[in-house]
Amino acid sequence: MVDSLDICKSCRECCIGTEIRVNDEDMDRWKKESRLDILLSINPLFGGSRHLIRKKNTEECIFLSVDGACKIQDSKPNICNKFPTNRKHAKAFKCKAIDLFFPISKIKS
């Protein structure tokens, strides 16, 4: 599989207007790494779920920089590392690199 960082176009569509869910593995890793910057930006949800806080004025992930770079690239949530999981998922988020992640030629074959 291709490393998403190598083909991402930094369009930021996947970082805007969505809840970036955090799982137990993320939490354990951030505790081990002493990443208080990340741990203090988690918003607990009803039912035990958690997600990263978004910027109020733009609905962007709090760790998204102005130039589209992820400020926690070295330790971002698992859900971000796995994005996009399939063409439909990438299309739903208007991913600008959809054809690089999922080339049409591979789908037709």
Image (spheres, rainbow, N blue to C red):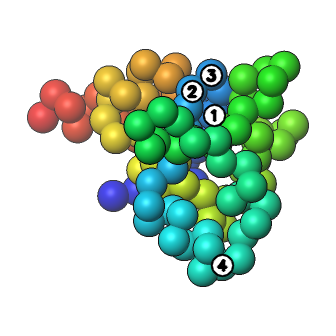
Q: CA distance from mark 4 to mark 1?
A: 23 Å
Identified by mark 2, the residue type is Thr
Closer mark to the observer between disc 4 and disc 1: 4
Q: Answer yes or no: do the residues labelled 2 and 1 have beta carbons within 8 Å?
A: yes
Residue pointed to by mark 1? 15
Identify the mark nearer the N-term, 4 or 2.
2
Q: Which residue is mark 2?
A: 18
Q: Residue at x 16, y 28 (%)?
A: 108
What's the distance in space between the residues labelled 4 and 2, CA to CA? 25 Å
At label 3, the amino acid type is Gly
Residue type at mark 1 is Cys
Mark 3 lies on a secondary structure that is loop
Q: Which mark is residue 33?
A: 4
Q: Are marks 4 and 2 in contact (CB under 8 Å)?
A: no
Label 2, residues with CA under 10 Å away: few <14, some 14-19, many ≥20: some
Distance between mark 2 and mark 1 Cα atoms: 7 Å
Taking the image as shown, residue 31 lies to the left or right of residue 79, namely right
Q: Residue furthest bottom?
A: 32
Residue 91, quarter of the rendered image: top left
Q: Dot 4: within a 10 Å radius of its alpha carbon, few (fewer than 14), some, or many (20 or more) residues?
A: few
Label 3, residues with CA under 10 Å away: few <14, some 14-19, many ≥20: some
In front here: 86 or 17?
Answer: 17
Q: Is residue 72 above or below residue 19?
A: below
* Element type at mark 4: loop
- Foreground residue, 36 or 72? 36
Q: How many angstroms separate mark 1 from mark 3 (CA)?
A: 7 Å
